[in-house]
């Protein structure tokens, strides 16, 4: 678990990050803030593309930024949308790669928490690295 202060900070960063989202097609801006075990926070936004399949979600942007900086352990992620939308299946799978105990905080654009759970709760039966044959 994380402290209430850490939770508030993550939500604030996620809400602020939404303003940088590139969502000209859906108009659905998403911001994310990922807390690594190191204490660093990585933000992310959704980036849409005219070729829809190559669009990337805010959660994955935050994870990929963190991983590119050497992070491998995550404590929590806050996701902010206009209405508290949940992470998609791809984002849940990417987060599960790094641990099922990562805490997920879903907030609306005002920063009000609408849902909290672990990745394991959001993705039961996740396919994990240990599921690959040796």
Image (tube, rainbow, N blue to C red):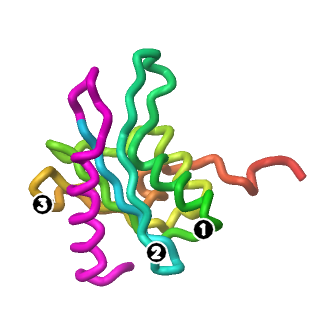
Q: Nearer the viewer, residue 39 or 91?
A: 39
* Residue reaching furthest to the top: 51
Q: Is residue 10 left or right of residue 120?
A: left
Q: Nearer the viewer, residue 128 or 49?
A: 49
Q: Tell me the residue that label 2 is attached to.
A: 40
Q: Position of residue 21 (x, y in %)?
A: 30, 41
23 part of magenta stretch: yes
Which mark's residue is nearer the viewer, 1 or 3? 1
Q: Give the mark nearer the N terminus: 1 vs 2.
A: 2
* Residue reaching furthest to the left: 110
- Find numbered disc 3 in the image and state the secondary structure of the residue it sits on: loop
Q: Give the mark nearer the N terminus: 2 vs 3.
A: 2
Q: Is residue 98 left or right of residue 53?
A: right
Residues packed near mark 1 inside 10 Å, few (<14), some (14 to 19) or many (20 plus):
some
Q: Position of residue 89 (x, y in %)?
A: 46, 38
Q: Are marks 1 and 2 in contact (CB under 8 Å)?
A: yes
């Amino acid at each position: 678990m994380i402290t209430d202060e850490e939770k508030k900070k993550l939500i604030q960063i996620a809400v602020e990050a939404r303003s940088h989202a590139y969502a000209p097609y859906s108009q659905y801006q998403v911001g994310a803030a990922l807390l690594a075990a190191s204490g660093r926070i990585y933000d992310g936004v959704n980036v849409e593309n005219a070729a829809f399949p190559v669009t990337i979600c805010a959660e994955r942007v935050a994870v990929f930024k963190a991983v590119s900086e050497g992070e491998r352990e995550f404590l929590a992620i806050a996701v902010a949308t206009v209405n508290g939308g949940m992470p998609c299946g791809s984002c849940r799978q990417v987060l599960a790669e790094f641990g099922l105990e990562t805490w997920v905080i879903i907030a609306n654009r005002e920063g009000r928490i609408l849902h909290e759970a672990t990745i394991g709760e959001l993705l039961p039966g996740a396919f994990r690295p240990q599921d690959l044959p040796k």
